[in-house]
Amino acid sequence: MTSNTMLTSTSKGDGVGGPGLLELHHVSKVFGVARSSAIAVDDVTLTIEPGQFVTLLGPSGCGKTTTLRMIAGFETPTSGDITLDGVSVLPVPPNRRPMSMVFQSYALFPNLSVSDNVGFGLKVKKVDKAERVRRVAQAMEQVGIGEYGRRYPHELSGGQQQRVALARALVMEPKMLLFDEPLSNLDAKLRERMRDEIKAIQRRLGVTSVFVTHDQTEAMTMSDVIVVMNQGRVEQIGSPRQVYGRPETRFVAAFLGKANFLTGKVVEAHGDGQATIHCGRMVVTVPCHDGVRVGGQAMVLVRAEGVRVSSGASDQVAAAGLGSSACLDGKIVSAAFDGPITVYRVATGLGEFKVDGPGARDVLPVGAPVSLTINQAQAWALPGDAA
Amino acid sequence: MSDARLTSSTRRASGRRLSGVTIGAKARKDRFVWVVLAVVVLAIILLHGLPVSKLVGAGLSRDGLAAISRAFTSDLTPMWNSLLLGVLVAVVGTLIGFVMAYVQVFSSVRGKKLLHWLTLMPMISPPFAVATAMITMFGRRGILTYKLLGIEFDIYGLQGLVIVLAMTFTPLAYMNIRGMMENMDPSLFEAAKALGASELYILFRVTLPMVTPALLASFLILFVEGVADLANPLVLGGDFRVLASEIYFAVAGTGDVAAAAGLALVLLVPALGVFCVQKYWASRRTVVTITGKPTGSRRSVTDPIVMAPLLVIAGIWVLVIIALYGAIAVGGLTNILGVDNTVTWEHYEFVARLGSTAVGTTLWMTLVAAPVAALTAVLIAWLVARQFPRLGKVLDFVGMLGSAIPGTVLGLGFALAYAKPTWLFGHPILPALAGGVSVGSGAVAIIAVYVARAIPTGQQSTIAALSQVNRQIEEAATSLGAGQAATLRKVTLPLIAPAIVTAIMYGITKSMTTITAIIFITTPQTKVMTSQILDEVDAGRFGNAFAYCTVLIGLVLVVLVLASAALRLVTRHRKAES
């Protein structure tokens, strides 16, 4: 059986055939024509391994949803190719691609009951009734809405509606699950729970998943691989740890977490991937990107949690035996208590710093002189010209 | 959900905002889409294209051109009169429509529901009902004007026509303006109030500017209707000559079809002009305030400075309506209302004896036409709103053009186009459809006219409904394996079912009460109620006419009640969605 006939004959994939390896080759999408055209997706190349949970992460307008919609078949790439198990899916209309999408608005059919919603795709596929009933029940059980079959969507809460949408996608046993910001309409608590549940179900079924979000926490907690996108381009592809701790561009560094940047001159490169950098009066030795060259400029990323704030000037702290060269004096500009942490803004000679202080301790008053100690092992240096 | 809606309403403003949602065409189209497109294009050609082009052909013949040049030179009166009538009807109708809408939306008077139905009443009654009742109640020997007040009011001519036409078409303005008022975000008024504005100030600086598009749209619609109306000038015109009646007399009096076609072209020009202005204007100004969630509930206006005068006007208007429909109801049961008020069943016996076939024929033709029109409208709307974002604009324009063609003009076009078999490349493709000797004795052509007249409104309401349906729902169906035909049938249609029912309701109402468009193609074999009524009015047998009208109004009401029951049925589970 060639993969091509496989695609059409098993249409909504019964899990047979290829394992679900998705590749995007130089995919671009331009909307509009001539003067009013805009590039939504710009030369994206990407490989999604079978069983992986991949997140497209980026600010709104970065092309992540358009990319997902091209995978689903709702948009056609202006150029480039998308292949599933090595075969182009571009000639395949969206309803014949072995993928199911979960939408931001849930997109439940308001005129159908929950079980009819879940059974919709099977009915279209003309799966016989007994089989359909069994699979619908199983899918609903899987997402924990077993008892709501006879209700209508408007009689459910947002979280339950989202579960119906998930069950409706799962029941098709697709090769790929596509998620278009499915959690952004839920409140914070529920979002956290659904996050864990989706991840658990995905892991259990081993279905390849592409998840679009602008929420970095969702991306970090759920993904095997994060694709950070900006202005239609891929900024970085990597594991959550890599994109957070070892970002390749300033954009990625700034988009994830709370970032402080120091610029300085590279004075020495050590063999172990570390470099010593002069930032004003401060000297740091930190892990660095391959592109960092001795004598060149470097940009040092210091996360808000990679800085320790202590009251008093640094010489006092140094005298207390805590100091190192990576110390900086400053003054508290603002302080906001946020439970486990206190978020400070600290004015220093090298600009303003965002610093996470412990929440358990008393909040330092605004205007208090403090010293900042940078945890050099957690910092990361990029070449100074990194965009 | 609100996001998607926002995008569609602000698409013009933010054409470059591409991030989130659903701009741009679908990837590939099923064959189904092309079949639908072909069917729709064929329907438009047969229903509008062919009749209008035949009419243009006849109008540009030598006799036609002579009639046109006469209308612009030696005999300017009909054209001038038509324009004057159109403007006056538009002004009066729009003003009253605004008042009724404002009272309906913002007042807290009791019996608003009743007020609503009374305001809409003229829409569901046949064209002569109001005119005839008007003569009886307010005419030279009118019960109210002469018998009660002693005034000898001359109802025939411009003044009478303006009142009757304004009354007939006010419901259109009312619905338009009320729709827009109800869509206004209540928090706007709360904001204005919080900033210290008085009710009067809010009326003029918030409400009026916001509904200006609806006011303008009503003005244009009423102008076209006023210019095109034939029935009322026939009954009430006296020696006030308008283009529409000139066309009728050219055909009915002298049989000069070419001259009639020429005059019809003259009538077509302002109608199409107005249509284009409206389209252009509507495209430049995005419709205000379409939001997801309502941000509060509307509080009624209580300030007497604003409400009192409006309530008075509304009250007078409703009283006039009650008087007129009272006259119709009573008139059918009395010998000669106002002259000999003895109660009699004579008129209803007449209707039962001679009119029962007309009632039956009207009913079945209407019941065939309305669903066909609704289906065509839905398919056009689907192509426009879902399948062809660019070509769709053209399709939408052409489809709506049907609403701009005056009934008189379209009717004449049908008579010209389908009285003989239609030929294409030397082959007869259609037999004669209009006239007594045609297939179905003219019923086919009449049904076709009904369909043609009902499509534009249905199209408009279904496009509006489609733009309210979250596209992700349809994409979800696609994602679950449904093709475009299946998605349309299983998801889209159920979601816009209310709009479809409304379109059918409108089609039935419009068809049952239309006369202008079918006056040239009615045949002795195919009796239509409205033309029967015209005969009775013409012969001065008002009692019979009143009885007919009452029966017709009753029928329309029954249909409407049934349809709203159907509407409730289809919207059972729809509380959450839009």
Image: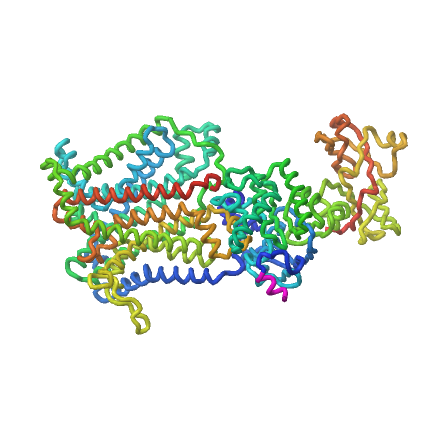
Horizontal side, residue B75 vs residue B183: left or right? left
Kindly indicate the quadrant of the structure image that contains residue A374.
Answer: top right
Q: Give the residue at x 57% y 59%.
A: A11
Kindly indicate the quadrant of the structure image that contains residue B148.
Answer: top left
- Quick check: can you spot residue B67? no
Q: Main secondary structure of the magenta part?
A: helix
Residue B361 % position (x, y): 23, 53
Image: magenta residue range: A1-9
Does the magenta segment cover residue A8?
yes
Q: Give the residue at x 48% y 29%.
A: B195
Choose between A124 and B470: the one closer to the eye.
Answer: A124
Which residue, as the protein is rendered here, is positioned at the far bottom? B426
Residue A351 % position (x, y): 76, 38
Choose between A230 and A332: the one closer to the eye.
Answer: A230
Which residue, as the protein is rendered here, is positioned at the far front? A130
Q: Is residue B199 above or below residue A151?
A: above
Q: Give the residue at x 87% y 29%.
A: A316
